[in-house]
Image (cartoon, grey):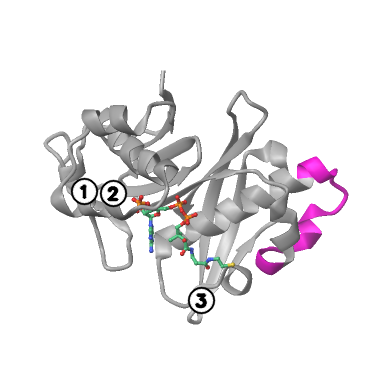
Amino acid sequence: MPLHKIITHDSATKIYIWKIEESFEDLFDEVVLNDINLIRLNTMKSEMHQRGFLSVRKLLQEAGYSDADLHYDQDGKPHLKPNSQNIEPVEISISHSFEFSTIAISDKPIGIDIELAKEKVLKIASRFMDVSHLKDLSEEEQIRKATVVWGIKESVFKIKNEKGISFPDHIFENTFLLSDKKATAQLSFNNLIESFDIFFEEIDSNNSQNYTLVYAFEN
Ligand SMILES: CC(C)(COP(=O)(O)OP(=O)(O)OC[C@H]1O[C@@H](n2cnc3c(N)ncnc32)[C@H](O)[C@@H]1OP(=O)(O)O)[C@@H](O)C(=O)NCCC(=O)NCCS
C-alpha cells in the first residue's frame, strides 16, 4: 500500500504520508494536473522529484482535494482552497524526500518536513544548529537528532516563509531528547520572538534507511 500512514494529530490536523513505490507512468496516469503544474513537472530534472511531486497529488486525493485546489504563491509556498467539506480556512504544508512524500492539512498554520537521515548532516551541523545538543550521544543518535533539528528549522521556515530568515541565526531549537517525540523552538526575527511546538517521528523504510518526519505549529 503506497499510502504509508495517516497521523491524526487533532480533530482538525492530519498528516498523510506516501511511500513512493509506483513508476512515474503509473502515478501520472492516476492524477490530473493543472496546466501550470504540468509545465512544472516537465521541467523537473530528476524522475525521483517528479514521482515525489505526483505522489503529493495522490495524497491530496486521499485528503479529499485535487491539484486544482492547490496553488503556490510567488515564494513557492502552497495554499489550499477550502473544499465542499470544509468552509473554514485550511492550511497545507508539503515535503518530499526520495522514497517518501507527506502533506499536512490543518485549520492552523503548519509546517512539515520529511528527511532521509544521512551521515552528511553531521558535517554541516555546526552551520545550522546548536551542536551542544548532540553532546554525549552515539554517532548514530547524533545523525538522528541533527536530522530532527534540520526538520525543525525547515518546518518553522515553511510556516513563516519570510525573506532573510536564517536557520542558525534566527531559529533556535530548545533542548529535547529523541525519545520525547516533541520539542519546542523559537524564531527570533525582526525584533519579534515567536514560539513553536514541534512533533517528530522516525519512519523506517524497511531497507535500513531511516526518514524523519517533523511538523511544527506556531504556539
Ligand atoms: C523552501 C524550502 C523550505 C524547501 O525545503 P526542501 O527541503 O528543499 O524540500 P521539501 O521537499 O521539504 O519541501 C518542498 C516543498 O516545500 C514547499 N515550499 C516551497 N517553498 C516554500 C516556502 N517559501 N514556504 C513554505 N513552503 C514552501 C513546496 O510545497 C515544496 O514542494 P512542491 O513545490 O513540490 O509542492 C527550502 O528549500 C528553503 O528554502 N529553506 C529556507 C532557506 C534556508 O535557510 N536554507 C538553509 C540555510 S542553512
Mark 3 or mark 1: name the one nearer the start of the chain: 1
Q: Disc 1 designates what residue?
A: 38
Secondary-structure class at tag 3: strand
The structure residue drawn at horizontal position 70% and vertical position 53%, both measured from the top left corner, is 120
Q: Are the two marked residues, 3 and 1, in contact with CB atoms closer than 8 angstroms? A: no
- Please identify the residue farthest to the top as the structure is shown: 1
Q: Disc 3 designates what residue?
A: 189
Secondary structure that dominates the magenta span? helix
The residues colored magenta run 127-141
Where is residue 32? Give x, y as percent. Answer: 17, 37
131 drawn magenta: yes
Q: Are the two marked residues, 1 and 2, in contact with CB atoms closer than 8 angstroms? A: yes
- Please identify the residue farthest to the right as the structure is shown: 136
How far apart are the two marked residues, 3 and 2, measured between alpha carbons? 34 Å
Figure quadrant, ligand 1: bottom left
Amino acid carrying mark 3 in the image: Phe
